Amino acid sequence: MKQFVPRLSRLLLILLFVPLNVGAERLPVKIYTSADGLGSSFIDYLMRDSRGFMWFCTRDGLSRFDGSRFVTYRVGDKNAPP
């Protein structure tokens, strides 16, 4: 126990004089809405596929995002995948 206290106090002194760079990195955040092409702003489920597409299950259909634009498939749409 006698050796523990001096070691602990040395460690605390070192930590006091070492500058800590704990700042968090700020990442850009973009919020997408139906105005950007998303089927609906209410999202039930989302996933990323093996090709990197983000898929969003919304109230108005299934939306695929490729990183720059949305393609939305609606029920009964003739362009919807089978």
Image (tube, grey):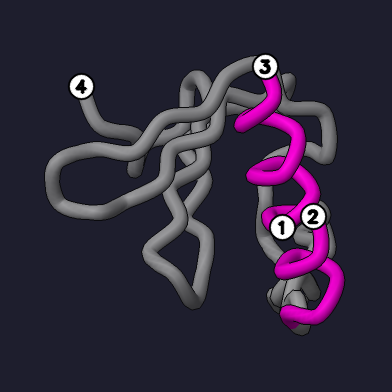
Name the residue at 48% across, 21% down: 76
Q: Are marks 2 and 4 in contact (CB under 8 Å)?
A: no
Does residue 37 appear to the left or right of 52 in the view shown?
right
Name the residue at 85% across, 70% down: 16
Q: Are marks 3 and 1 in contact (CB under 8 Å)?
A: no
Q: CA distance from mark 2 to mark 3?
A: 17 Å
Q: CA distance from mark 2 to mark 1?
A: 5 Å
Q: Is residue 58 above or below residue 26?
A: above
Name the residue at 81% across, 65% down: 13
For mark 1, give the secondary structure.
helix
Does residue 7 appear to the left or right of 29 in the view shown?
left
Numbered range of the magenta stretch: 1-18
Q: Residues within 10 Å of mark 2 (few under 14, many from 20)?
A: few
Observer-nearest of 7 and 68: 7
Label at residue 12: 2
Q: Is residue 62 visible?
A: yes
Observer-nearest of 42 and 1: 1
Name the residue at 35% across, 35% down: 80
Q: Are marks 3 and 4 in contact (CB under 8 Å)?
A: no
Check residue 47 for magenta coloring.
no
Which residue type carries mark 4?
A: Pro
Point out residue 41 in the picture as x, y percentages from the top left corner.
83, 39
Q: Residues within 10 Å of mark 1 (few under 14, many from 20)?
A: few
Point out residue 9 in the picture as x, y percentages from the top left corner.
79, 49
Label at residue 10: 1
Q: Are marks 2 and 1 in contact (CB under 8 Å)?
A: yes
Q: Which residue is disc 4 drawn over?
A: 82
Which residue type carries mark 1?
A: Arg
Q: Which of marks 4 and 3 precedes in the sequence?
A: 3
Which one is closest to the eye, mark 2 or mark 4?
Answer: 2
